[in-house]
Amino acid sequence: MKTSLHFANPAKQNEKSRRQIFEAMERVISSGSYILGSEVQEFEIAFAEYVGVRNCVGVNSGTDALILSLRALGIGHGDEVITPSHTAVATVAAICATGAKPVFVDVDLDTFTVITELAERAISGKTKAIIAVHLYGHPCDMNGLLELVARSGVHLIEDCSQAHGAEWNGKKVGSFGSVSCFSFYPTKNLGAIGDGGAVLTNNDELAERIRLIREYGWDKDRVSLEISGVSRLDEMQAAILRVKLVELKKSIERRNEIAMLYKNEIKNTEIILPTTSIHAHHAFHLFVIRTKNREKIIDNLNQLKIFPGIHYRRPVHMQPAYLKYQQLDGDPLVNTNELAGTVLSLPMYPELDSSDINRVIEGINNVQP
């Protein structure tokens, strides 16, 4: 009997590292230190080294990583932050949580990432930052964005929640901006068994400020220097992430192998396959095709017990909570709206075997126009 295939399967990855994960969990339980202890510290050091930056601050989630980064940069009421609408709601929710206004710009149809020229056009006197979302594992145009922020003086915040291990010109994403934000949600390339996130930066003062506001604004004597909530990466998740970080490079290599098989063998003319910039090393968090025949392909795959995903069916600017941020006289977000009706995420995780991959390929190739 054929097993079900989904666009992601974190349980498979956890099973592969089950022994090491349980050993790490036992280490935490036996330590008696459960909040911001040695496991978090060691993971922060290891992940900062992996990305190639000086500082990593573990927090509760990728969303909190964005919120704390914006706050640390002094962004709030009356400010504007440029962002794509073709992204997870979390990107935009974080902006709104600070009281700032999201300003949506369109994305490139090939890379699914923000178009630099449109970001430049959207800059106003109120713009304080651009959030570059490295969507699906493909880096943004860092050449153009770095030139833009250098000219304009706005901050560049990297949303790396789907791009652990991706590179631009041989340099890891997360090492370019004023600050970068990662999610360790279970389905990510580097996923916890629960929530988790991190903020990375080469700015030591900014890192210290983020550490301050991640825990009640406390100084070393637990005196609150400013009003803040709490957002901590816990010891158990940090220990698990340390186990998985060891295998991340190999995991991304396997994702790229699977992506190449899909690209070489999917022959359905109704499908537009993803492309990769010559400057980029894709992390393939998701393998996202485009097709105007989406519902028929989904039905056909479902019959084969293959369940793809849609990321994202409704762009953020079209969701009820965010309608007030639509630019009625600005960028019409043509590409964003087209992607909402055509994107489809195929199964993509390192534990897929050759028979799984062939099932997906045959299922798509056999769909009739």
Image (spheres, helix red, strand yellow):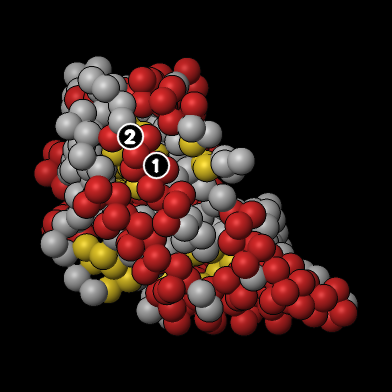
Q: Which residue is drawn at 17% across and 32% down?
A: 269
Residue 63, compared with residue 290, is above or below; it is below
Q: How crowded is mark 1: few (under 14 residues within 10 Å), some or many (20 or more)?
A: many
Residue 242 falls left or right of residue 200: right
CB under 8 Å between callouts 2 and 1?
yes
Residue 115 appears at what percent x and percent y?
Answer: 18, 43
Label 2 packing within 10 angstroms: few (<14), some (14-19), many (20+): many
Observer-nearest of 205 and 50? 50
Q: In the picture shown, does residue 335 fall above or below 137?
A: above
Residue 207 visible within the image: yes
Tag 1: amino acid: Val
**Residue shown at the point (22%, 34%) measured from the top left:** 268
- In the rendering, at what x and y percent does residue 312 appear? 40, 32
Marks 2 and 1, Cα distance to the nearest angstrom?
6 Å
Give the image quarter of residue 107: top left
- Mark 2 residue type: Ile
Viewer-side residue, 59 vs 299: 299
Q: Identify the residue at horizontal 45%, vertical 52% (top origin).
A: 355
Mark 1, residue position: 360
**Res. 14 image quadrant:** bottom right
Circle 2 sits on which residue? 364
Residue 288: x and y, percent?
A: 33, 42
Who is closer to the viewer here, 162 or 252?
252
- Which quarter of the image is occupied by the N terminus? top right
Return the mark for residue 146.
Answer: none
Q: Which residue is drawn at 51% across and 47% down?
A: 8
Instruction: Establish if 165 lies above or below 319.
Output: below
Where does the image place residue 62, in percent across and percent down from the top left?
53, 53
